[in-house]
């Protein structure tokens, strides 16, 4: 086998990270290499028939109109995005925010993941004599950000305040006194609700972060992949206003179109322009498919109806059933805790004081056909060997069919009990 010499960038991006291995593992389990009993691992949105039907009928309309079809399939749009889609985003979000948006506030990327890659690498990395970094004000945070930086050690993070609630619940909040912020911080980023914990950074916390970011002339980035307004899988959403310095990202993926690769970024024009310029270099333009499919759904607000009538009830129902089995199969005398559910498609389970770490728990569960994601990967910027909490959590995707939830929670309950036995 040939060994080509890779650049520092090439090496940084391709060296086997734990998460790459894990994703392979989860993918292989799906492909039947291991017979899964419960797939609590992946983060894919569920397929909801009524939502798929709505996309199907839009696709049908487009395919009946030769001009639209030719435009959707046969054109490169501008690097910023399709102008009709951007207009629909402006109109839709101008009803959502109090501030009126303009087209220069919006850029479309091929999935929000690619958008984050571009944004993070514009804002963090070597800059003259300094090395600028992205700050996660609260970890655990979305694992997909952690390997995105072209240079090493470009993420810093702050451990949260952990509040224990009753016997089996806990909640994170931002520890503002410990915020690891200085003149080398290039941006602050939170997902809201957070993947993996389902935590929602409160409006008060967001306002404090917005103020800090404005004072330091750096952007605050809020990732709304699961949040408001669509798919809106968020409990008691506290409204957050566009203050001219915050970048809000949205994704069509969690509404059911991950294959369309459509990320939407709303933010200050200077940054949005830079994002579009970089998009031209990386992608020429972003995929048309999702933009064409969803333009009318934004104009008519049909996307809100789909979210409220089908997507939100679907996840609420899966969550309810998953909770029933947790109640049934988890030993109440053990000190396990779930993070307060405030949104997202996940439960975040903390096994405080368990005798095995989450990687060992993952391996034991996998042998029994239950796939979860070990928590260690979600603590970017932290040394997990120095912080037991970072080795004591796992993420569970609860949006699975009844039989998987029942069989999976049963095995999980037994494995947790074993994890507390010395
Ligand atoms: C919090 C969060 N942000 C961003 C993404 C990326 O989504 P996409 O690139 O499909 O828009 C995901 C995907 O799982 C996510 O969970």
Image (cartoon, grey):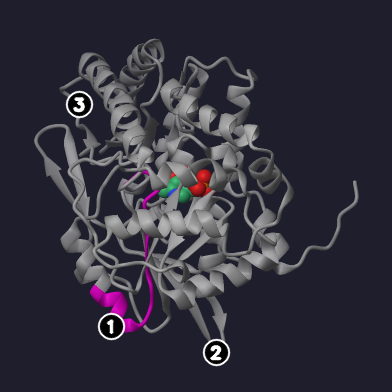
**Residue labelled with disc 3:** 334
Label 3 Cα neighbours within 10 Å, binned few <14 / some 14-19 / many ≥20: some
Distance, label 1 to label 2, CA atoms, is 22 Å
> Would you place residue 12 above or below residue 224 in this image?
below
Q: Quadrant of residue 372?
A: top left
Q: Position of residue 337 (x, y in %)?
A: 22, 34
Q: Which residues are magenta?
A: 211-227
Residue at image position (90%, 46%) is: 1
Distance, label 3 to label 1, CA atoms, is 46 Å
Q: Of helix, strand and loop, which one carries label 3?
A: loop
Q: Nearer the viewer, residue 108 or 205?
A: 108
The CB of the residue at mark 3 lies under 8 Å from ligand 1 = no
Q: Can the viewer see residue 223 in this picture?
A: no
Which residue appears farthest toward the bottom when viewing the image? 129
> Would you place residue 344 above or below residue 381 in this image?
above
Q: Earlier in the sequence, mark 3 or mark 1?
A: 1
Label 2 Cα neighbours within 10 Å, binned few <14 / some 14-19 / many ≥20: few
Residue at image position (50%, 74%) is: 123
Residue at image position (57%, 32%) is: 61
Taking 344 as reference, is 278 left or right? right
Q: Can the viewer see residue 243 in this picture?
A: yes
Q: Of helix, strand and loop, which one carries label 1?
A: helix
Closer to the observer: label 2 or label 3?
2
**Residue labelled with disc 1:** 215
Would residue 222 be counted in the magenta stretch? yes
Q: Earlier in the sequence, mark 1 or mark 2?
A: 2
Q: Quadrant of residue 6?
A: bottom right
Q: Quadrant of residue 80?
A: bottom right
């Amino acid at each position: 086998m040939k060994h080509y010499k890779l650049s520092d960038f090439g090496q940084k991006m391709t060296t086997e990270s734990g998460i790459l291995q894990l994703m392979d593992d989860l993918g292989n389990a799906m492909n039947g290499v291991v017979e899964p009993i419960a797939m609590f691992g992946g983060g894919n949105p569920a397929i909801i028939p009524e939502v798929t039907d709505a996309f199907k009928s839009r696709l049908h309309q487009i395919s009946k109109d030769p001009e639209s079809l030719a435009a959707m399939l046969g054109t490169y749009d501008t690097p910023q995005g399709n102008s009709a889609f951007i207009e629909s985003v402006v109109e839709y979000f101008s009803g959502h925010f109090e501030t009126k948006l303009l087209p220069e506030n919006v850029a479309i990327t091929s999935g929000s993941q690619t958008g984050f890659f571009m944004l993070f690498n514009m804002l963090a990395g070597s800059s003259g004599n300094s090395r600028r970094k992205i700050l996660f004000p609260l970890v655990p945070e979305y694992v997909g950000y952690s390997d995105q930086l072209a240079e090493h050690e470009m993420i810093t993070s702050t451990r949260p305040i952990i509040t224990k609630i009753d016997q089996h619940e806990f909640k994170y909040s931002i520890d503002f006194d410990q915020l690891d912020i200085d003149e080398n911080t290039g941006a602050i980023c939170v997902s809201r609700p957070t993947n993996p914990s389902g935590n929602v950074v409160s409006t008060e916390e967001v306002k404090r972060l917005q103020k800090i970011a404005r004072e330091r002339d750096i952007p605050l980035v809020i990732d709304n992949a699961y949040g408001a307004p669509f798919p809106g899988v968020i409990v008691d959403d506290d409204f957050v206003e566009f203050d001219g310095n915050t970048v809000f990202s949205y994704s069509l993926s969690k509404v059911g179109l991950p294959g369309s690769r459509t990320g939407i970024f709303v933010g200050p024009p200077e940054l949005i322009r830079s994002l579009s310029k970089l998009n031209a270099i990386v992608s020429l333009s972003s995929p048309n498919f999702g933009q064409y499919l969803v333009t009318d759904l934004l104009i008519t607000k049909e996307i809100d109806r789909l979210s409220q009538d089908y997507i939100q009830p679907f996840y609420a129902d899966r969550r309810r059933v998953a909770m029933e089995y947790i109640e049934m199969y988890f030993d109440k005398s053990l000190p396990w805790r779930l993070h307060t559910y405030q949104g997202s498609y996940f439960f975040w389970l903390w096994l405080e004081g368990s005798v095995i770490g989450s990687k060992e728990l993952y391996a034991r569960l996998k042998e029994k056909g239950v796939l979860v994601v070990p928590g260690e990967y979600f603590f970017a910027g932290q040394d997990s060997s120095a912080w037991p909490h970072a080795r004591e959590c796992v993420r569970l995707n609860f949006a699975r069919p009844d039989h998987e939830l029942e069989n999976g929670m049963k095995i999980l309950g037994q494995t947790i009990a074993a994890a507390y036995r010395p």
